[in-house]
Amino acid sequence: MGPVELLHMSVFSQSFSPCGRFLAAGNNYGEIAVFSLSAALSPDASEASQKPILNFTAHDGPVFSLLSTDTHLLSAGNGEISAWSWAELIKKSTKAAWSRKPSYETSLEIPEINAMIINPKDNSLIVGGGDNNIHIMDMETGTFKSVLKGHTDYIHCLCFKEREGEILSGGEDGAVRIWDSRTNRPVHCIEVFKYEECARPQFGKWISCLATDSDWMLCGGGPSLSLWHLRSMSPTSVFPLPGCQREAVFYQDLIMSVGEGPHVSHCLHGGTVKAQIPCTPSSLNTLALNLKNTEHRVMTVGGSSHQIDVFTNFSYRAFSLSF
Amino acid sequence: MSIKFFRIVQLAYWRMGSITDDEVIRKRLLIDGDGAGDDRRINVLMKSFTKWCHSNFSPEEGLSQYQRMLTSLAQCEFSMGKTLLVYDMNLKEMENYEEIYADIEKSITSAHDKIAECKKEIQRAKRIRKNRQEYDALARVIKQHPDRHETLKQLEALDKELQQLSHIKENVEDKLELRKKQFHVLLTTIQELQQTLENDEKMESEDTQESLMENGD
């Protein structure tokens, strides 16, 4: 990979292995790189341990979304979902376990897949992408059982509320739609850009990040990142972050979000920005927390750079992995 | 003397195949640096004692030699006593260090426990902070809406007004009905009176016509 390609690389997605010792990252060239966290975090780590143990081309187009189940790594790019077994990846074998495509209405253009989540209750994969619809696939049989239609523009992000079994989806049309996963019907539709306190018309109305924590929901993108109380469907706090946020998560009592700007923002539920931690990429696309493994409890962020920053203590950058 | 010993030790180690020369020299000199003096003194004492016993000295020389031997014997005894005391001191120091070691071990474990406790506390405090923040956020939203008492009072006032107005409407309607009826009665009596007046006129005109006709016959 030449220096020019490295310069133009963007990391779009990340996922930790089920054991928590490996990190998979997908970039805009369609490659997936697997990094060994135990090697990179060990006391005698060297330059070589910050390079991937395996780097292969998984898709023709950019890998927009990565998801780990208990045994497999699912990756999605231009309309196709591929599954790779983690055990095989650790042994450096790059043969896909299976590869499927949701049934699209038009066969001319294959829309990209932007977000994938798993519904643990009925073991189904929920996929949202460029054709404005949400497809639900049963993981055991591999058939696409239903389609949720309602968005008028492509879907950026998906989220799942475990307690009520509801799917939340945010899209380019500025609406956050809430669907019931059992009946597959839309329950609510929140148009964030219509609320004055959140709307930022100079950026647009698209919603690119969603996160939920039982009764609360974070959403942001064109409109400012805001915390919503879902029972009353009202925005409770708006965070004064300058750029557009691409991913946000709830962690203990904090909210961490990344987006435009070379920093990770730590915010409190009340609406104050507690800290902004600087990092190497000039703008960030993805943030992942490794909570499954207590030894390698790290946060990794990736964005417009071939380097992925690793934070062992969430308050400062420890080192960077590079493609 | 010490160099000879060093050579013996070096040979021994070479036979065993371990440690370098420098280490051996260093260690030997460190340990035995002072001891070489004592060793030499004892040997010198022995030699001078045997010489003193076997040779014929003049009484003054013999006495001075004897004095010299006594002093060197005293020196040897002194250095032996010193080394015994040092040995005791080392033993006591070792005990002291063992105690301190045990103490430090204990405090390490207690510090570990305290750290674990504090971590739990932090988690609790974080949860509490999160809950407070959520509460504040919701409270802010709720405050934006008007007070429940106010709205209830407004509703009550409106209700009362509504009742009053309907009451008034009823009254007005009743009055209207009454007036209608009264006018109706008035009009009917007028009409009847008109009828009776017409009837009377007709009867009067009929009477005059009859009387004219009778007069004409």
Image (cartoon, coloured by chain):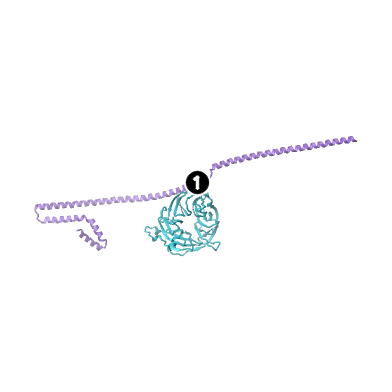
Depth check, front residue: B11 or A132: A132
Depth check, front residue: B77 or A223: A223
Amino acid marked by disc 1: Arg
Task: Write down the chain letter for disc 1.
Answer: B
Q: Quadrant of the C terminus of chain A?
A: bottom left
Q: Colour of chain A?
A: cyan
Residue linked to disc 1: B140
Q: Could you tell me if residue A141 is visible in this image?
A: no
Name the side, left or right, on which B157 lies relative to B6: right
Q: Colour of chain B?
A: purple
**Total number of numbered discs in the rendering:** 1
* Residue at (66, 39) in percent of width and height: B172
Where does the image place residue A65, in percent across and percent down from the top left? 48, 59
Q: Could you tell me if residue B102 is visible in this image?
A: yes
Q: Is residue B159 above or below residue A173?
A: above
Q: Quadrant of the N terminus of chain A?
A: bottom left
